[in-house]
Amino acid sequence: MIGGLYYINHEHNISIGTIVEFIVYVNMLTFPVSAIGLTASMVQRAAASSQKRLNEFLDIEPEVKDSLSAKEAVIEGTVDFNNVTFTYPDTGIVALKDFNLHIQKGEKVAITGRTGSGKTTIAQLLLRIYDVQEGNIQLDKAPLTHLQLHSLRQQISYVPQDVFLFSDTVENNIRFGIPNAKKRQWWKQPALQE
């Protein structure tokens, strides 16, 4: 409006071109400034939403916990499953029913069976990912529920069926849990002969 009045009154050497140029520059500046505000608003909303989801995950209380009398586990290797029955709580599938197993210290045991026969369940119960509903599991004659979860799980190696590899070397994937492990030559493969 002021530019128009200056032009009409021939003041300050204002031309139509100067007014058009001013309006174009104002329009060119308006969008980026509003886009900065819009982007800042979107970032804030996304951060709040992400933090809310993270907090929901972090606030989940594990169902399996140490008992007040839990002791540090020092595993020698004797395992006993005594009349163990286990049903998955989320699906209602009975994975084990009156299952018994005795493994002596130093003994090697292979458990085979069809899909869904309970092989993975045995490993998960031994690690106390779940607790048994009936029967009991003993490790070196001590009830599994009387051992500290952290020390128990630190002494047992478990390779789940869900395969996950990092985008790294095979060696680094193997050494992931123990970064200071020494590199070993596990076997020497003889050269192939024709």
Image (spheres, rainbow, N blue to C red):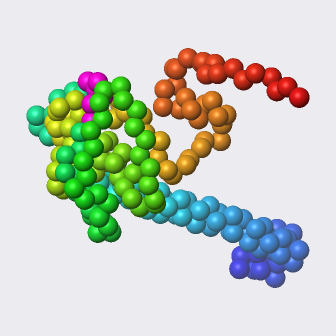
List the single residue furthest toward the left: 69
Residue 149 visible somewhere in the drawing:
no
Q: How many marks?
A: 0
Q: Is residue 106 above or below residue 64?
A: above
Q: Residue at x 23, y 39 (%)?
A: 80
Left or right of 104: which side holds 108? right
- Is 28 within the magenta? no
| Drawn side of residue 70 relative to residue 94, left or right | left
**Residue under the image location 69 percent in, 20 percent down:** 188
Magenta stretch: helix, strand or loop mostly? loop
Q: Quadrant of residue 139?
A: top left
Going by the image, does 157 lie left or right of 73? Answer: right
Residue at (63% x, 30% y) in the render:
171
Q: Which residues are magenta?
A: 74-79
**Residue 93: where, in percent of width, then height?**
32, 67
**In this view of the protein, which residue sits in the foreground, 90 or 28?**
90
- Image position, residue 73 (x, y; %): 24, 28
